[in-house]
Image (cartoon, rainbow, N blue to C red):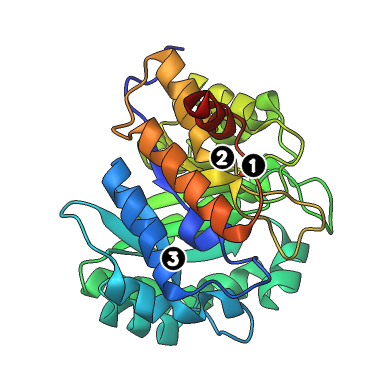
C-alpha cells in the first residue's frame, strides 16, 4: 500500500505530556508552550483537561491556559472532558474539540475510571450530545487497544467493540491508543485494519507510546494500511499513571523527522518544534526524550 501524501499530527504534549509531572507547572509556562506549538503549524493541539484536580492536579490550571493562549484561526484546541461538569468548563473555555475516553480493556476501565466499558460510554452520552448541540468536534479515545497492564492481551475484537460504541456517540475522530507502549508493527496493522471495518479509516488515529521503542515502526506500519492521523508529544513528554513503567508518547520531533525523510507533508515546522521541546525540557530541568530533537539542537550548537 502507498503511504499517505499528507499526515495530520495531533500535538498532545501540553495535556497528555504534562499531566503526569510531579511538580506543578505554572499556567504561563503551559501557555508559552501552546503558543510555540501553534506557531510551529499544528492544526490540532490538546491543550487542556477539565477533570477533577483531585485526580489530575497538574491540569488544575486549564481554565487559565485556555484563556491565556494566543489562538490562531483554523487551529483546533482540544480539551479532555470526562463528564458534563468538564464539558461545561470546556465550552466556557472555548475549546474547539472535546475528548471523551474509554478503554478496550475491562480491567483498565475499572482501574482508570472505576466503571465498566459499557458504563463509561453511558456516562459520556450526555457529553457527546451536548458537544453535537453546540457544534463542537467530538473525539473518542480508546486506551489499551494493544495491551493492558492488568489483563495483558487485548483482542482486536475488543477494540472494534469499543470503536462501535464510540461511533454510536457520533464521534468525528477516534484514537486507537497504545497506552502502555507494547504494540509491534504487525499487531498495529491487524488492529487498525480491524477497526477500519467499523469507522472511516480517514478519521482513525494512532496514539503510540514508546515504552519498547516501537512507536515509529508502529506509525509506519499504520500508514501502510491507510492511517494518516497520529498523536505525538513534544520532547517525548508523558507517561501513564495507571501503567507502571510506561514512557511518554512518541516524541513529535522524531515523528516529524521521519515524515520529512519520507516526503510526507505535515504542515509543521520541525525546527520550531525542536525549539519548543528544548524550551519545555529546560524548564523541567532534564533532557528532552526526543533523539531527533536533541540531535538537531546539538548540531545547531555545533
Q: Earlier in the sequence, mark 3 or mark 2?
A: 3
Q: Earlier in the sequence, mark 1 or mark 3?
A: 3
Kindly indicate whether the residue at mark 2 contacts the one at mark 1 (C-beta within 8 angstroms).
yes
- The spot of residue 30 in percent (x, y) is 44, 65
Q: Earlier in the sequence, mark 1 or mark 2?
A: 2
Callout 2: helix, strand or loop?
loop
**Residue at (29% x, 73% y) in the render:** 68
In the picture of the structure, the residue carrying the numbered disc 1 is 289
In the picture of the structure, the residue carrying the numbered disc 2 is 251
**Residue at (47% x, 66% y) in the render:** 100
**Residue at (53% x, 34% y) in the render:** 293
- The spot of residue 136 in percent (x, y) is 25, 66
Q: Is residue 232 left or right of residue 288?
A: left
**Taking 283 as reference, is 196 above or below it?**
above
Kindly indicate whether the residue at mark 2 contacts the one at mark 3 (C-beta within 8 angstroms).
no
Look at the image and tell me whether residue 131 can be seen: yes
- The spot of residue 84 in percent (x, y) is 41, 84
**Residue at (37% x, 42% y) in the render:** 203
Q: CA distance from mark 1 to mark 3?
A: 18 Å
In the picture of the structure, the residue carrying the numbered disc 3 is 30
- The spot of residue 8 in percent (x, y) is 36, 37
Q: Say which quarter of the image contains residue 155.
A: top right
**Taking 51 as reference, is 248 above or below it?**
above
Q: Say which quarter of the image contains residue 200.
A: top left
From the image, state whether disc 3 or disc 2 is nearer to you: 3
Q: Residue furthest front?
A: 302
Callout 1: helix, strand or loop?
loop
Amino acid at each position: 500500500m502507498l503511504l499517505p501524501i499528507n499526515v495530520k499530527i495531533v500535538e498532545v504534549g501540553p495535556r497528555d505530556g504534562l499531566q503526569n509531572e510531579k511538580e506543578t507547572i505554572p499556567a504561563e509556562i503551559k501557555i508559552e508552550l501552546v503558543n510555540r506549538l501553534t506557531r510551529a503549524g499544528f492544526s490540532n493541539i490538546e491543550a487542556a483537561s477539565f477533570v477533577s484536580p483531585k485526580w489530575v492536579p497538574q491540569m488544575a490550571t486549564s481554565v487559565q491556559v485556555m484563556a491565556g493562549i494566543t489562538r490562531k484561526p483554523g487551529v483546533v484546541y482540544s480539551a479532555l472532558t470526562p463528564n458534563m461538569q468538564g464539558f461545561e468548563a470546556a465550552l466556557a473555555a472555548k475549546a474547539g474539540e472535546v475528548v471523551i475516553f474509554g478503554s478496550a480493556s475491562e480491567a483498565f476501565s475499572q482501574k482508570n475510571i472505576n466503571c465498566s466499558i459499557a458504563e463509561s460510554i453511558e456516562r459520556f452520552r450526555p457529553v457527546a450530545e451536548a458537544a453535537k448541540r453546540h457544534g463542537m468536534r467530538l473525539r473518542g479515545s480508546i486506551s489499551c487497544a494493544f495491551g493492558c497492564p492488568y489483563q495483558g492481551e487485548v483482542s482486536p475484537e475488543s477494540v472494534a467493540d469499543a470503536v462501535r460504541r464510540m461511533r454510536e456517540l457520533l464521534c468525528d475522530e477516534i484514537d486507537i491508543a497504545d497506552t502502555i507502549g507494547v504494540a509491534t508493527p504487525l499487531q498495529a496493522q491487524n488492529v487498525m485494519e480491524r477497526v477500519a471495518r467499523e469507522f472511516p479509516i480517514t478519521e482513525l488515529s494512532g496514539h503510540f507510546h514508546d515504552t519498547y521503542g516501537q512507536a515509529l515502526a508502529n506509525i509506519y506500519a499504520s500508514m501502510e494500511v491507510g492511517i494518516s492521523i497520529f498523536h505525538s508529544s513534544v520532547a517525548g513528554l508523558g507517561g501513564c499513571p495507571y501503567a507502571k513503567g510506561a514512557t511518554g508518547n512518541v516524541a513529535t520531533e522524531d515523528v516529524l523527522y521521519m515524515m520529512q525523510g519520507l516526503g510526507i507533508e505535515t504542515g509543521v515546522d520541525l525546527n520550531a518544534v525542536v525549539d519548543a521541546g528544548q524550551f519545555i525540557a529546560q524548564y523541567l530541568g532534564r533532557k528532552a526524550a526526543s533523539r531527533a530533537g536533541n540531535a538537531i539542537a546539538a548540531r545547531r550548537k555545533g
